[in-house]
Amino acid sequence: MKFDIISVFPQFFHSPLSFGILRIAQEKGIIEVAITNPRDFTQDGVVDDYQFGGGAGMVMKPEPIVKAINHVKTKNTCLINLTPKGKRLTQNTVKELVKNEHTIIICGRYKGIDERVNSIFKPQQISIGDYVLSGGETGALVLIESITRLLPGALGNRDSANSDSFQEYLLESPIYTRPNIYKKLKVPQILRCGNHGLVARWRRKQSLEKTLRQRPDLLTSETFAKTDLAILMEVLNGKNS
Ligand code: ADE
């Protein structure tokens, strides 16, 4: 998967791309990341200007961004504009985005980019959450890491995407490692009993309960198995098992 990031702050990415899964995925040739600076497509280095109609905040000029996009665009490019006005990113969107071979991510700065960039290229407009950041750069890293985790070979055996929260609309159950007792707190006995069936049921119950308590909105899109409904009833009735 090739990522082309369009950003006026290329240095922003150097450290995050040099660690952990993003470094390893690049070394293994699973992903390739290049950064293009719209400033390099100007005569005077100016990439922003005042807003028509008045109002605080500078707007990124269309021409340097259009030129930067055209410089890296191919026939099969997926184009993404990161903006708080976009559709909120979910694991389902990530599962769709992982199918693309080439993704261009436009990082707006200041107040955002001139709307005509959207009119010309019709990129997918994506927000990483309902809050406002100072630019799309942080979001680009979120996007690249969430996609890379799903690419074959990117995660080693020590890690797994399958049991992650959201992978199937539920939050992940609590996890523990050694020591068995820490500050008088014991790992739940069931996780040490060696019965995989019991462990799986315990984890499912924990997942359902955590989702019910912390993110009930996620449960509306879940197609429950009958067993899940029985477990949820236990949770609601306050039964421990
Ligand atoms: N740029 C500024 N805020 C953002 C957000 N929430 N998501 C994506 N890009 C942004």
Image (cartoon, rainbow, N blue to C red):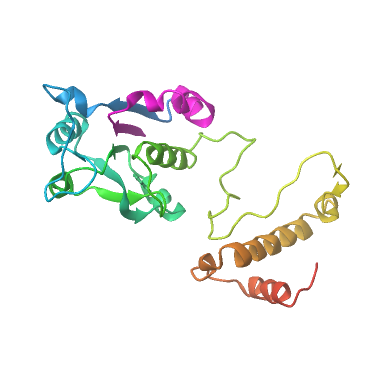
Residue 98 drawn at (x, y percent): 39, 44
Quarter of the image that includes the N terminus: top left
- Camera-side residue: 227 or 134? 134
Give the percent coordinates (x, y) of residue 196.
Answer: 77, 54
Residue at the (83%, 51%) spot, across then down = 194
Q: Position of residue 118 (x, y in %)?
A: 18, 48
Residue drawn at the location 65% of the way across and 61% of the way down: 210
In the rendered structure, the answer to whether residue 153 lies left or right of residue 60 reads right
In the rendered image, residue 16 lying in the magenta stretch gets the answer yes
The residue at the point 61 percent across, 67 percent down is 212
147 vs 22: above or below? below
Seen at 38% across and 43% down, the residue is: 133
Inspect the magenta stretch and tell me whether residue 79 lies in it: no
Quadrant in the rendering for residue 168: bottom right
Picture coordinates of residue 101, whole percent (x, y): 32, 38
From the image, which quarter does the C terminus lie in? bottom right
Give the residues drawn in magenta, as a range.
1-28
Q: For this rendering, which residue is in front, 120 or 190? A: 120
Q: Which of these two is toward me, 36 or 149?
A: 36
Tally the numbered discs: 0
